[in-house]
Image: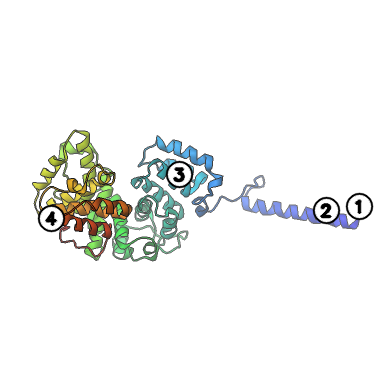
Amino acid sequence: MSTRRKWWFIAAAVAIAAAAIFAFRRSGSPTSLRRDPPAPDSLLNIPLDRTIEARKEFVRAYRVADRVHSGPLFEAFLPRIGANGIRDGIKTVYPACHDEAHELGKLIFSRLQDVGASLESCADACASGCMHGVLMQFFTNGSMASMDGQAHQHSAQLTTADIAGRIPTFCDNQAMTSMYSPGDCAHGVGHAVMFLSKYDIPAGISLCERFQSYALRYYCATGAYMEYRLVRTPTDYPVHGGLYPCDSAPYPAACFRYVMTNTLRWLDSNGGKLETLERQCATLKGKYRLGCFHGIGNALVGKIALGQLTVANACGFGSRDDQTVCVEGAMERLGKFTPTVAAERCAPLTDWRREVCQAAASRKMYDMTKSFAMYQR
């Protein structure tokens, strides 16, 4: 063997031995050459071309799964299709998704343990639904380091006192302000505190009261009641009545805004009429009455958007104030998600309601400067 070839074989042997030693050190086993598991964040954005078949499998499984409690299914598919694949799958099955993305947000934060990175991974999926899940998991199982990009350092878990102390400035954090408005953030916190409070209304709302401005307290209450709505089933109605708990709860407009969607669904399935519900609202007094009509507007936004119901017909009952809060309930939401459709639905109005409709559609949801004169605690 020539000297050159001998040295080539020696160099190759050394390279192979070095590679084997490196693999051994990484694996911790003399018989395993497996790679380290991928870093958590690498699971959250897997390229489409590597996941096409797995994505199809996920969609098939998700169509027959529990749409709101799909955490185990998401966890099983996360390493295969990433959070981006799960996001796309949710929207494929439920295009108007929101509640469905809560479990994804919880899963993402449980992996990353960092609020900012988790929000980036959510990519504002499902009308902030993923963000709400992140905050629910953060406030329930997060750490004091989770807002500061130090997620993997050992840190004390948040206590109820920690949470109460952080709420006043939580929505000032750059991780939130870079992606969400203060009102939208407060709404997400509302979801989290109601979840944390195990759906006890006084306990959840008391945490919302930690915000310094009335607007943020109100928007926090909207998130808390929206989260509460998820666990309230139609079987409650024969026991408590269709207006429970909003006819006696704090921030009744925030409460009716979301609980009314269940009430109307139950009414439709039982052959009831909208006029019956409107007359029930009219029996209430003051802020409860206004809140009730506001809830009707928000609950009917889908029918208004589809052209099944006009704004005039949806919000034509009661006093001028009743009609105003009803129009705002529908059009602030419609303006946020489909501004072109909102403008089309306002156009046929020919009286004072047209100006209210257009202003609400332009203002959208979570506006910090709107008047809360008709949205009292």
Q: Residues within 10 Å of mark 2 (few under 14, many from 20)?
A: few
* Foreground pick, 275 / 163: 275
For badge 2, the amino acid type reads Phe
x, y percentage for residue 155? 42, 60
Coloring basis for residues: rainbow
The alpha-carbon separation of the residues under discs 2 and 3 comes to: 48 Å
- Residue 80 vertical position relative to residue 253 in the rendered view, above or below: above
Of the residues under marks 4 and 1, which one precedes in the sequence?
1
Q: Looking at the image, is mark 3 or mark 4 nearer the viewer? A: 4
In this view of the protein, can residue 37 be seen by the observer?
yes
The residue under label 1 is: 1
Residue 75's disc is 3
For badge 3, the amino acid type reads Glu
* Foreground pick, 338 / 139: 338
In this view of the protein, can residue 202 be seen by the observer?
no
x, y percentage for residue 279? 10, 43
The residue under label 4 is: 321
The alpha-carbon separation of the residues under discs 3 and 4 comes to: 47 Å
Q: Is there CB contact under 8 Å for labels 2 and 3?
A: no
Residue 151's disc is none
The alpha-carbon separation of the residues under discs 1 and 2 comes to: 10 Å
Q: Secondary structure at mark 1?
A: loop
- Residue 373 vertical position relative to residue 279 in the rendered view, above or below: below
Q: Is there CB contact under 8 Å for labels 1 and 2?
A: yes
What residue is at 47 percent from the left and 42 percent from the top? 76
- Residue 169 vertical position relative to residue 111 in the rendered view, above or below: below
For badge 4, the amino acid type reads Asp
Of the residues under marks 3 and 4, which one precedes in the sequence?
3
For badge 1, the amino acid type reads Met
x, y percentage for residue 367? 27, 61
